[in-house]
Image (spheres, helix red, strand yellow):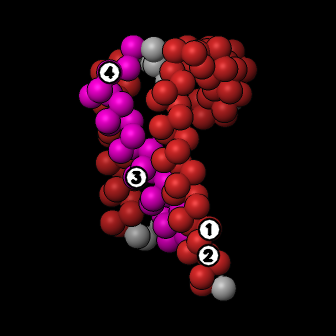
């Protein structure tokens, strides 16, 4: 969630989120799933392009510091700081945050429906 986001970076980030939620579980359950792994790679590429278009924000700056000082992985450090960064920037990114959480909620809802139908 960058205050410097733009339509280009938002489109890339949205597709990265969508692909990540769409294919992460497929890879987790079958590491040999080349198609799903390729699409996760594409998601990571889109996320990187979105970062490049806007620059990294407070969450990454803080996470890099935590990683270097405390030695925790970057992902764990992001998990620690991201809730507070989102809360701090909420007013500036509320529309984008609502859109992305809607996208995630829709995906989770579809997964739950699929799981219930399979049972």
Q: Are marks 1 and 3 in contact (CB under 8 Å)?
A: no
Separation of marks 2 and 3 at Cα, in angstroms:
19 Å
The residue that appears at 45% across and 14% down in the rendered structure is: 3
Between disc 1 and disc 3, the foreground one is: 1
Q: Residues within 10 Å of mark 2 (few under 14, many from 20)?
A: few
Q: Is residue 44 visible?
A: no
Disc number placed over residue 95 in the picture, else none: none
Q: Residues within 10 Å of mark 4 (few under 14, many from 20)?
A: few
The residue that appears at 66% across and 85% down in the rendered structure is: 119
Give the mark nearer the N terminus: 2 vs 4: 4
Give the image location of residue 30, x and y in percent: 50, 71
Between disc 2 and disc 3, the foreground one is: 2
Q: Which residue is mark 4?
A: 6
Q: Which residue is mark 1?
A: 112
The one nearer the camera, 41 or 116, is 116
* Image position of 81 with respect to 36: above or below: above
**Bounds of the magenta span?**
4-30
Disc number placed over residue 19 in the picture, else none: 3
Q: Which residue is mark 2?
A: 115
Magenta span includes 25 = yes
Separation of marks 3 and 4 at Cα, in angstroms:
20 Å
Separation of marks 2 and 4 at Cα, in angstroms:
36 Å
**How many marks on residues?**
4
The one nearer the camera, 115 or 102, is 102
Give the mark nearer the N terminus: 2 vs 3: 3
The residue that appears at 40% across and 70% down in the rendered structure is: 33
Separation of marks 1 and 4 at Cα, in angstroms:
32 Å
Give the image location of residue 43, x and y in percent: 37, 46
| Residue at disc 3, secondary structure | helix
């Amino acid at each position: 969630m960058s205050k410097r986001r733009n339509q280009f970076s938002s489109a890339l980030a949205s597709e990265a989120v969508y692909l990540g939620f769409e294919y992460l579980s497929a890879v987790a359950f079958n590491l040999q799933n080349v198609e799903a792994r390729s699409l996760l790679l594409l998601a990571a590429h889109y996320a990187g392009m979105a970062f490049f278009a806007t620059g990294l924000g407070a969450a990454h700056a803080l996470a890099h510091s935590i990683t270097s000082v405390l030695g925790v992985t970057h992902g764990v450090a992001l998990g620690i700081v991201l809730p507070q960064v989102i809360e701090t920037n909420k007013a500036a990114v509320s529309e984008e945050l609502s859109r992305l959480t809607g996208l995630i909620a829709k995906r989770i809802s579809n997964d739950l429906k699929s799981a219930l139908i399979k049972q």
